[in-house]
Amino acid sequence: MLNIALFGPPGAGKGTQSEFLIQKYKLYYISTGDILRKEIEQISELGLQAKNIIEAGGLAPDEIIVQIIEKTIKENPDVKGFLFDGFPRTYIQAYILEGLMIKLNTSLNCLISLEVDEEESVKRLLLRGETSGRKDDNEIVIRKRLIEYEQKTRPVLQFYKERGIYVAVNGLQSIEKVSEDIDLIVQNELSKSLFNIVLFGYPGSGRGSQGKALARKYGLEFVATGPMLDQEIKKQSPLGKQIKSLYENGQLVPDHLVVQLIEKKLEESKGVKGFIFKGFPRTLVQSYILDGLLKKHGSAISMVIDIEVPTLELIQRLDDRSKTDHCMPYDNSTAKIVKRLQEHENKTVPVIHKYNQLHGVTKIDGQGSFEEVFERVSKEVEEGIKRMR
């Protein structure tokens, strides 16, 4: 999710640049004035509280404002992010927004400040007053608003400077150049977001080889639980010894051991553009675990891919593989192959259904040569990357 706060003194051009950001990045626009008026018009409980205070000559308190903002965010879970205009307006509101973002498991990516000096602001607003007919666009009111901005809002900029997410843009440039500079800032923020793929497919669908090839092509880290478990055994680590003992006794490796390896992988993989998960999650429980692990590391699933191959072809592929060095333990008999396919049907297909409801699942025809399938998968991945950016 991309969350941006757009700042600037009156006349800096926030309205114009807000439209640019909303249109290009499909952000949901949050203006405290707009959402407050909406609540009042809807005669909601919060709206009535705000209306009574305003009619008595007061300003809507932060307690009501933050509840309305939280309500607005929760009512729009499918948007790509939010653009805040007019909030936070004070140092206290900056803390309020930070707490709200934490509660909603997200954060403010950046604060973009359009820098315009006082005389330019006055000049622009007086010019606007000549055409808009707005009574508040006179020099006395304008300078009063600019003083208020300096006194109340400048400290907010310092708050975000200290957090390292404040970015200044020269607002004296042309509208096009300001938009271009803002676009570069947003693209830089998006480049920090990890692109995470969960790759599904029945045994024999080719997801392992496709996943490795995708990882190489797009600079992603390939995460496959099987090789990770085998590596721990080869290293004879304490965890590896536990895994070996379980294997020797014909037991499955419990989730809490697998999670340790995945979390270690996430922590140690620095500078990667994202991850491709193959073989995890296999169950609904594991899907919730993966969601939690990614959230803990400030990330989320970006794309879910399911490589589809007809059952008879899967059986043929697995039977052919049993005669090679790549033979898996379940490849050496038709009964074992069928059992493994049934296990995928019973345990993993429900996970795919869950992700389809949450994120949507991209189905890929897995028939044909490796190159043909890889071309199809790559095309979808590139579309997914474009949508994220």
Image (tube, helix red, strand yellow):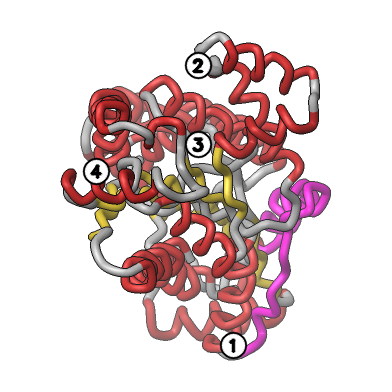
For mark 3, does the 10 Å Cα neighbourhood hold few (<14), some (14 to 19), or many (20 or more) residues?
few
Instruction: Kindly report the distance in space between the C-alpha atoms of the residues bearing marks 3 and 2.
Output: 62 Å
Sooner in the amino-acid sequence: mark 4 or mark 3 = 3
Whole-number angstrom distance, CA of label 3 to CA of label 1? 37 Å
Q: Are marks 4 and 3 in contact (CB under 8 Å)?
A: no
Task: Identify the residue under disc 4.
Answer: 315
Contact between marks 3 and 2 (CB within 8 A): the answer is: no
What type is the residue that disc 3 sits on? Leu
Q: Secondary structure at mark 2?
A: loop
Q: Main secondary structure of the magenta part?
A: helix
Q: Which amino acid is tagged 2?
A: Leu
Graded by Cα atoms within 10 Å as few (under 14), some (14 to 19) or many (20 or more), the crowding at tag 1 reads some
Front disc: 3 or 1 = 1
- Give the residue number, with chain letter if any, for mark 2: 252
Q: In the image, what residue occupies the spot 83% across and 48% down? A: 162
Tell me the magenta residue range.
Answer: 146-173
Please name which of the two marks, 4 or 1, marks the residue nearer to the observer.
4
Q: Secondary structure at mark 3?
A: loop
Q: Which mark is residue 59?
A: 3
Q: CA distance from mark 2 to mark 1?
A: 59 Å
- Tell me how far mark 4 sits from mark 2, CA to CA: 23 Å
For disc 4, the neighbor class at 10 Å (few under 14, some 14 to 19, many from 20) is some
